[in-house]
Amino acid sequence: MKTIIQKIKFKAAPNVLFELYMDTKKHSLLTGAKAVISRKAGGEFSAHGGYCWGKNLAVVPNNMIVQTWRAADWLKKDMDSIFILTFEPVKGGALVTMVHADVPDQHAKHLNQGWKDHYWKHWQSYLKNQGR
């Protein structure tokens, strides 16, 4: 099992970034694939047209999201991973820290790049084009 850790600074407030992930319409728009996301602890989510899914373990609005997470191409014997996003105000915007723990070894490289390509680049572009 691997752990992926990424820290990305954005020129936007934590609440704006929190909404990019937790708002079903924005999440779907920015990834280009259907997402359905509950905002409640215990609620379920799916993203990328059902490629990945899980359950919210904790949701602290504008501050932290903790989810179980797995993907359609994982083996049945693979345990769910744990996905954590935190949103911290910093000068000029916010720092997003992502920790994706217990990722099966054979999927870690793909997911490490996937978060950058399918989330952070799209968030940066959206914020640049939409303003804050």
Image (spheres, rainbow, N blue to C red):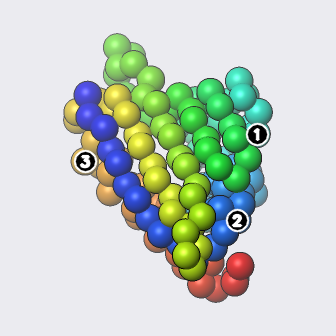
Percent x, y of residue 33:
60, 55
Q: Considering depth in this image, is 63 or 66 the residue closer to the camera?
A: 63
Q: Which mark is residue 39?
A: 1
Going from the N terminus, do you reach mark 1 or mark 3 first? 1
Question: In the picture shown, does residue 114 fall above or below 71?
Answer: below
Q: Give the Cα separation between the discs numbered 3 and 2.
A: 28 Å
Q: Residue at x 71, y 60 (%)?
A: 15
Q: Is residue 100 left or right of residue 55?
A: left
In the rendered structure, are the residues bearing label 1 and label 3 in contact, judged by CB atoms less than 8 Å apart? Answer: no
Q: Nearer the viewer, mark 3 or mark 2?
A: 2
The residue under label 2 is which amino acid type?
Val
Q: Nearer the viewer, mark 2 or mark 1?
A: 2
Q: Is residue 24 left or right of residue 77?
A: right
Q: Residue at x 70, y 65 (%)?
A: 16
Which residue is disc 2 drawn over?
A: 16
Is residue 95 visible in this depiction of the protein?
A: yes
Q: Considering depth in this image, is 38 or 84 the residue closer to the camera?
A: 84
Q: Secondary structure at mark 3?
A: helix
Question: In the picture shown, does residue 40 fall above or below 120?
Answer: above
Q: Residues within 10 Å of mark 2 (few under 14, many from 20)?
A: some
Choose top left, top right, bottom left or bottom right for residue 75: top left
Q: Nearer the viewer, mark 1 or mark 3?
A: 1
Q: Is residue 107 left or right of residue 100?
A: left
The residue under label 3 is which amino acid type?
Lys
Which residue is disc 3 drawn over?
A: 109
Q: Residue at x 46, y 31 (%)?
A: 82
